[in-house]
Image (cartoon, rainbow, N blue to C red):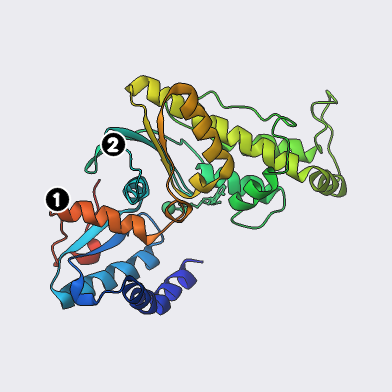
Amino acid sequence: MPELASRAHMQNIVPVVDTAIKEAGISLSDLSAIAFTQSPGLIGSLLVGAQFAKSLSLALQIPLIAVHHMQAHVLANLVEEPKPSFPFLCLTVSGGHTQIVQCLSPFDMKIIGETIDDAAGEAFDKSASLLGLPYPGGPLVDKYALDGNPGRFSFPEPQIPGLNFSFSGLKTSILYFLQNAGKSHIHKEIYLATEEEQQQFIKDNLADLCASIQDRIISILLNKLKKASIQTGITEICIAGGVSANSGLRSALVDMGKKYKWNTFIPPFQYCTDNAGMIAITGYYKYLNKDFVPLSEGASAKATW
Ligand code: KG4
Ligand code: ZN
């Protein structure tokens, strides 16, 4: 509901900034610059942030910095120690994006692989919705998967060349699997279950379904990450974005890192899903580089990365 989201931004932006300043124990006059999320996102909400940031920078006579949301997810890895050193690879997995980014410096990043259809977060959320779980389903799949057997059901891994990802086929295979209440691997002919049978099947097998779906999403992600590391020779590996909060992905990355002698970095939970800290750290690097928005441009400025 974009309209409700931008209204909520208008209502909350002043109290949120006030609280942040108070909790940091500083005053507005201590600020050196204002960074704001320029894109991508819901346009109405982005405009509220951009206009507020512009007004504040004008009032305080300090520079304004436009930040790209996806670059900020990657740089969330540099907020706290231990930090990766350059060059590193970052697997950025969120609700709208799935990317492997090769990072040579905070200002030199290249997307070397990305999804050709759904993002990993969408794969979690759409699978969860097929299981009757509310949006956003990713955290719930994670929770139920903890008690499930990931080897119980097998969903296909797409054969996409290079470093790109695809998740739409997974969603379709889960849909068909549920429509015949898991009988496709027992009966050769197509069996169409009634609505009640499907619901009962999901209820009886929720933990195993979540664990098996999560396991397939993780193997799709990590197999491409492994390929990217071999291709680039980079063994400094990070993850970022909302899906990097997934406990299965976090532990599978640690295991893979041990196996291939990578240095792996996983941001603390609060820097995985959308947060202002990642915008601030990107603003900090852009500040050092004097990458400021001319005040005449304001909200219409493009954030490059
Ligand atoms: O980065 P993010 O907070 O927002 C976007 O920029 O999209 O990512 C949101 C996505 C949602 O799809 C949500 O279901 C997923 O991250 N997510 C998770 C978990 N926590 C958040 N997916 C799987 N397991 C989780 N624990
Ligand atoms: Zn995000």
Give the quarter of the image for residue 297: bottom left
User: Of 219 and 182, which appears nearest the observer?
Assistant: 219
Whether residue 162 is visible to the viewer of this picture, yes or no, is no
Is 93 situated left or right of 143 in this image? Answer: left
Q: Position of residue 211 (x, y in %)?
A: 68, 39
- Closer to the camera in the image, 186 or 191: 186
Residue at 35%, 64% in the rendered image: 46
Residue located 57% across and 44% down the image = 247
Mark 2 Cβ and ligand 2 under 8 Å apart: no
User: Is residue 232 visible in this depiction of the protein?
Assistant: yes
Q: Position of residue 16 (x, y in %)?
A: 38, 74
Whether the residues at callouts 2 and 1 have beta carbons within 8 Å, the answer is no
User: Which amino acid is tagged 1?
Assistant: Asn
Q: Nearer the viewer, mark 2 or mark 1?
A: 2
Mark 1 or mark 2, which is nearer the start of the sequence?
2
Q: Nearer the viewer, residue 275 or 130?
A: 275
- Residue 212, picture quadrant: top right
Q: Which residue is mark 2?
A: 85
Residue at point 28%, 67% (across, down): 50
Foreground pick, 216 / 75:
75
Left/right placement of residue 226 relative to residue 46 reads right
Image location of residue 156, percent across then percent down:
64, 27
Would you place residue 134 above or below residue 103 in this image? Answer: below
Q: Which residue is mark 1?
A: 289
What residue type is disc 2 on? Ser
